[in-house]
Amino acid sequence: MEHNPTSRTEPILTASNISKSFGNDLILKSVDISIKPGEIKVLIGPSGGGKSTILQCLNCLETPDSGEIRFNGERIDFHNRKALYRYRQQVGMIFQDFNLFDHMTALKNITIALQKVKGMTGREASDRAFSELEQVGLQDKSHLYPAELSGGQKQRVAIARALAMKPKLLLLDEPTSALDPELVGEVTSVIRKLADKGITMLMATHQISFMRSLADRILFIRNGEVEEQGKPEELLGTGMQTRCQKFCYELNHMDGEKL
Amino acid sequence: MNKKSLLILLAVSVFTVAGITPASAKDKIVNGIDANFPPFAYIDKKGEPAGFDVEAMNWIAEKNNLEVTHKPVEWNSIIQTLITGKIDVIASGMSITEKRAEKVDFTIPYWEIKQVMVVPENSDLTIEKIMKGNKKIGAQKGTPEAEWLKDNEGENGYNYELRIYKSSPLAVQDIMNGRIVAAAMNDAPAKDICSKKDVRILGEFGMHAEDFGYAVKKGDKELLEMMNQGIKDLKASPRWDELVEKYNP
Amino acid sequence: MIEAVTVIKNALPFLLKGGITTVTIVIGAMAIGLVVGVIMSAVIVYGNRWAGTLFRIYIWFFQGVPPLVLLFMFYFGVFNYIGFNLNEIMVAMLVLGMITGAYQANIFRGAMQSMPKGQFKAAKALGMSNLQAIGSIILPQVLRMSIPAWSNEFSIILKDSALAFVIGAPEIMARTQFIASRTYQHLPLYITAACIYFILTWAGFKGLKRLENKVMIPGYSYHGA
C-alpha cells in the first residue's frame, strides 16, 4: 500500500547530535534523526546498538547527555518538566513489553490518561477509548485485565492507548519482539492500518519483510551511530551489498524468516 | 463517594475520642495518682478513681470551687509529669523525702506511715532472717523504701537481693508465686493487701517512718497555700474521721 | 475460681473501654504511618536525592530507637519544648505513627522497586507527570502488593500500643493493672487482657484479608509478594 509523505514539508521532529551514556557505557555516540509528517522510518540493527535508547531519548524518557531535539520547530528543554509533560502528550510510544497498567481494565488503561492528562470527562474518555479499541478490534475485551489478555491483544490495547491521545508522532520500540510468532500477525496488521491512515511512525523492529514494505526510509543503527540510511530498495535491494543487508541476511538465517 | 465519607467519619471519630474535653464553668485542676495504690488511690468497681487521697482531694477542690480530675499516671514518672505541667498536683500517698523535695514543693504532712515487710501468712521468717539471710525481697519502683533498701544493701550486715516491681500488688503477687519471700511497703497499703490475700505484716524492718504530703510544682505558691489550708480544714472537719473510718489506712 | 470469674465479669466493661482506647491508638497510628510511609517511599524511589537521604535518616532513627524511649522522649521532652500540649492518647498515636511510618516506608519502597519499570515509563510516555504516574499507576499496585506486610505491621503496632500505658494512656494494659491492684486477681485478669488483644488481632487480620480479596486483580499475581 502506498502512502505519500510530502517531501516539501518541514520535519515534525528533528534530533541532532544526540549522545547518551549509562554509567561508563556510551550507548549513543552521535545520532541525527528527523521525520516528516506522514513518514514512516524504521530503525534496524543489532541488540545493544542503541535503537531503543534513541527512541527513549526522543520522547525524553531518557534525558540525552547532549544534542538538541526540535518538535514542530520548537526546541525541547530537557529540564523543563512541564514542557516535557506537554511534549509527551504529542508523542506516543509503544513498548516491546506492552507496559499496560496491570491493575486496570483495557478500557481504563486508555481512559486514565485521557482523564488525568487531557482532562476529559468520564463519558468523553470512555467514548474515545471504545472507538480506539474498535479500531484495533478489541471492543469486546474492554472489561478484561491485562493478565487476561494474550500478548498480541495486549499490544493492540497499548496501540489503542497511545493513539487515543491523538499524538502527532508514534514511536514503536520493537512492538512484536516479545510476541509468540502466531500472534505477530495481528499486531503487524494493526500497524499496517495505521500506516494506511498516514500516521507518522518511527519504529525499531526485527521484522524485516514487514517493515520493508512499510518503510519510507530505513536507518541501520549500530554501535550508537547511524551507519547507513536510505530507501528500502537502496539498502536491501538485490545485489546492494550494504552492511544493512548483511545484517538482515544474518538475522534471516537465525530467524528462518524470508527476506 | 461512599467510601470516602466513611473514611472521613472514621478519622473524625478517632480524633474525637483522642482529643476532646468537655467545657465547664469551674476552674479545673488535675490530680495525678498512682491508681495501683489502695487504699490511697485506686480504680473502683465502676472504673472510677477512688481512695483516701482521691476523696480528700475532692473535698479540698470543692471547698475551693474547683473541678478536679484524677489522672492515673505511671508512678515512676509522676514527678516528671508534674514538672511538665500535665498535672497540677500529686495527691496520692506520696512520701515526703529530701530528694523529692528538690524537685517539688510539699505540703505539710497529713499522714504518717511506717515501712513494713509483708510476708506469706504461714511464713516463719523474722525480720533478721529477711534482712540478713540472703533472701530475695521486693519493693515498688520509685519509692523511698525501694531506694532505702538499695542504698543500704551490704550495710549493717544486711544481706538480701532486691527486686523491683511496678506496684506493690505485683510484688505481693510474686510473694505468692514464691519468687520473693517478702515485700517492703507502706503500712497502709500493706493492711489493704493483707485483708485480701494470704499475707501478713511482719513488722518494721529498720527504715525510718515517713510522712505523706501532697506535692505541687516548685514555685506554685498559690496552689501550695490552698492545699495546706485544705489539709488543715479537712483534718478539723468530721469528713476526716469519715475517710479514716472508710479506708482504714 | 468463682471469685476470678466474678472479677472478670465485673471488669469486662471497663477493660473493653480500654479496648476502644487501644483501637483508637492503633488506627490513628497506622493511618499516620500510611501517609508518612507513602510519601517517604515515593520520594526515596522517585524523588529528589537530598530529600530521599533525609528520609532515610528518619527511617534509620525511628527503627533504631526503642518505642518506649521514643514515647518518653516525645511525651516529656519534645512536645513539651515546642509547647504542644497533647494528651497521652494523641502522643501515643503520633509516636507510634512515626515509628510505623518508618517501617511502612520500607515496605512500600520494596514494593515500588520490585515493580516493572515499564509501568512508570508508559505512564510518563502518555504525558503523565511524576505525581500522576505515582498516584494513579504505581501506588494502587504498590498498596495492593503491600497488604500482607501491612497486616504484619498492624499486629506489631497493636502490641506496641500496650506501651502507651507508661505515659498514662488508659488502654487495655493500664486498666488491667488497675483492677488487678484492687482485686489481686492478677492471672485471670491478664489472661482476659490477652484474649482481648487476641480478638483484636484476629479481627484486624480478617478485615485486611477481606480487603485483599476485594481489591485483587483478576489473573494477576504480584512479583515477589
Image: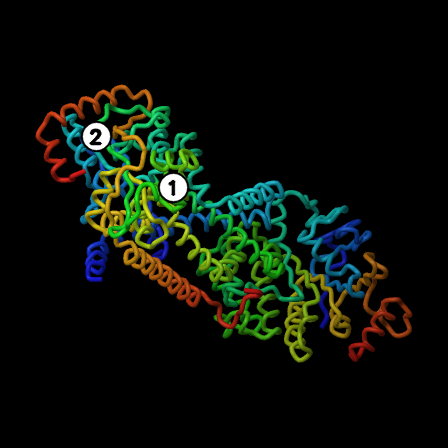
Depth check, front residue: B151 or B135: B135
Rendering colour mode: rainbow
Q: Position of residue A8 (x, y in %)?
A: 76, 55
Q: As displayed, is residue B29 above or below residue B169?
A: above
Ranked by sequence position, the earlier of labels 1 and 2 is 2
Q: Which corner quadrant of the image does residue B201 belong to?
A: top left
Q: Is residue B99 visible?
A: yes
Depth check, front residue: C94 or C116: C94
User: Of tags 1 and 2, which is closer to the observer?
Assistant: 1
Q: Position of residue A54 (x, y in %)?
A: 74, 56
Q: Amino acid at mark 2?
A: Trp
Q: Amino acid at mark 1?
A: Lys
Q: Is residue B9 visible?
A: no
Q: Is residue B177 left or right of residue A99?
A: left
Q: Position of residue B103 (x, y in %)?
A: 36, 25
Q: Is residue A173 left or right of residue C192?
A: right
Q: Secondary structure at mark 1?
A: helix
Q: Which mark is residue B233?
A: none
Q: Secondary structure at mark 2?
A: strand
**Tag 2 residue:** B111
Chain under numbered label 1: B
Q: Residues within 10 Å of mark 1 (few under 14, many from 20)?
A: some
At x 43% / y 33%, what residue is drawn? C77
Depth check, front residue: B152 or B77: B152
Q: Position of residue B3 (x, y in %)?
A: 36, 57
Q: Is residue B53 left or right of residue B245?
A: right
At x 54% / y 43%, what residue is drawn? C61
Chain under numbered label 2: B
**Tag 1 residue:** B132
